[in-house]
Image: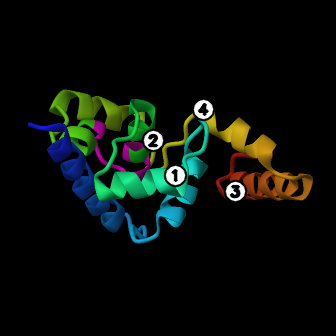
Amino acid sequence: MSLDYEKSAFAKRLRESLKRARVDAGSSTHVAREFNLRYSGDPVSSQAVRKWLAGDSLPSQDKLRTLAMWLDVPAPWLRFGEPERRESAALTARQESGPYKAQITWSPKKFDALNHAHKRMVVEMVHALLRLEGKQ
């Protein structure tokens, strides 16, 4: 299998996953913005996302894992088209408590990037949600 084929097959799976997640794959700027909200490393550009969607390049492994988590698909399937082994899928399902999977390192970095007013809003929302769930 050639690298060009792998890139185009990845792009097809990525577009398919974005469509299932109801994300506009026609806007690389929108996809980049949504991806960067979930990725704890250096932000990706809309040009990088455009290349992923066009099959011109492949994301690095850490970016691929973030894409897979965001789009709720197995990373091996997204990259190679291979199904995830049943044992590891069952283990992952048991380890996760809900459909939203936040990375531990993601929240503090993104929170620190907010201005004071937005930080205050986030804190107030968290307190309100905890009260609703009877955990505060």
- The span from disc 2 to disc 3 (Cα, nearest Å) is 26 Å
Q: Nearer the viewer, mark 4 or mark 2?
A: 2
Is 1 situated left or right of 70 in this image?
left
For disc 3, the marked residue is 129
Predominant secondary structure in magenta?
helix
Residue type marked 2? Thr
| Closer to us: 10 or 103 | 10
Residue type marked 1? Phe
Q: Nearer the viewer, mark 3 or mark 4?
A: 4
- The span from disc 1 to disc 3 (Cα, nearest Å) is 25 Å
Is 117 situated left or right of 111 in this image?
right
Query: Which region is colored magenta?
Result: 68-75
**Residue 102 horizontal/vertical position (percent):** 55, 42
Asked if labels 1 and 2 touch by Cβ distance under 8 angstroms, the answer is yes
Asked if labels 2 and 4 touch by Cβ distance under 8 angstroms, the answer is no
- The span from disc 3 to disc 4 (Cα, nearest Å) is 19 Å
Secondary structure beneath label 4: loop
For disc 1, the marked residue is 35
Asked if labels 4 and 1 touch by Cβ distance under 8 angstroms, the answer is no
For disc 4, the marked residue is 104
Query: Is 27 placed above or below 106 here?
Result: below
